[in-house]
Image (tube, grey):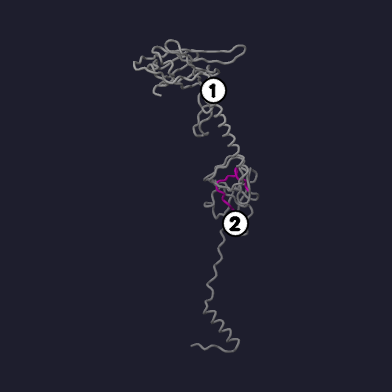
Amino acid sequence: MDRTIHVTVNGEFVKKDSKNAGVRGEGNAAKLHITMSEDWRQYSKRLIWRNALGENPVSVLLYKSVAELVVTQAEGDGGETADPLVFDTPIPSEPMAVDGWCSFTIEGFRDSDPTAVAIAVTDYLLVKPNDSFGAPAEPTPTQAQQLQVQIDRITEETAAVVQEAVDALEQAERDMKVWEPWDSARTYLPLQKVYRLGSSYICKQTIHMKGVHMTIIKIEQNKNGSHDNNTIAGATPETFPVPEGWAVIPPELGVPETIPNYPFGEIVVNDTGDYPEVIQWTALPIPESEPEPGPGPTQLDRVEAQATYTAMMTDTLLKED
């Protein structure tokens, strides 16, 4: 559409930024961008066009589709809903069939008790002469035809929205029935089932923990002064239950690469919170490795030993060359 005429309706007053609708014979070549005040919200609205002779009225419904009133994008991606008081509507061919000042009237209607309530505003646009004017453009559908088209469209759009909701519920149900191996790079939704290291868990909240790690250490000490330990990628104490007999090493205490002589040390554990937590680390000496045994006897050594043993048992000795 080439031209846009901005129209502001404030109560029963109309303001527009152009008076020119176009030239005679045009149709749907220009549009009105109508912005209404809040007191029009409660009304159903239609736009009535008449030519410069005040004849051949054409009604156009002003409405918003279901799709426009539903969020158009996923949450977090800048999704916006359509403003129910802003409308874009083309200028049809009927009021453009006669040069002069055509009129447009915006009517509002709502049921009320005891009587119905209506509101209306009217303004005019100039249709300029056109010497080459010929056959008029395609006529605007009647109000009944427009209503039927909109009813059919709403039915299809409503069915699509309902189907999307059903699909989402079915997907959530499938997710809740399947036990999946823990993957720190994945996002898990509430009630999804996850298993790791022989244990199974149900997610309480949305989890996306890529790059986050939790280090746990067994409270009971081994004979050599060390502690069994494990670093779990993509987990926190709030999202991954701490096994019984284990404690969490908090980030402020360090990581396995920076804790002295880890995992050899004495620990002090605070178990009064939501989960056991190491609050003190005292490094212990790392045990020295046992020396490796020397090389074993060669084949020649074994032969000489066997010969010496045989000579001793038979009172004979081999002569050396």
Say which amino acid is labelled 1.
Gln
The quarter of the picture where residue 154 lies is top right
Q: Residue at x 51, y 27 (%)?
A: 68
The quarter of the picture where residue 135 lies is top left
Between marks 2 and 1, how big is the CA–CA gap? 79 Å
Image vertical order of residue 4 relative to residue 121, above or below? below
Query: Within 10 angstroms of label 2, few (less than 14), some, or many (20 or more) residues?
Result: many
Q: Which of 92 and 290 is in front in this view?
A: 92
Image vertical order of residue 186 relative to residue 148, above or below? below
Question: Where in the figure is residue 72, as x and y percent of width and height?
Answer: 51, 31
The quarter of the picture where residue 96 lies is top left
Tell whether label 1 touches label 2 (CB within 8 Å): no
Query: Within 10 angstroms of label 1, few (less than 14), some, or many (20 or more) residues?
Result: few
Question: Where in the figure is residue 203, as x and y percent of width and height?
Answer: 61, 42
Q: Which of marks 2 and 1 is nearer the N terminus?
A: 1
Question: Where in the figure is residue 295, as x and y percent of width and height?
Answer: 52, 72
Image vertical order of residue 247 relative to residue 152, above or below? below
- Chief secondary structure of the magenta portion: loop
> Magenta stretch: residue 77 in it?
no
Q: Nearer the viewer, residue 7 or 195?
A: 7
The image's mark for residue 226 is 2
Q: Which residue is drawn at 62% across and 11% down?
A: 114
* Residue placed under numbered mark 1 in the picture: 148
Question: Where in the figure is residue 282, as x and y percent of width and height?
Answer: 58, 53
**From the image, which quarter does the N terminus lie in?**
top left
Say which amino acid is labelled 2.
Ser
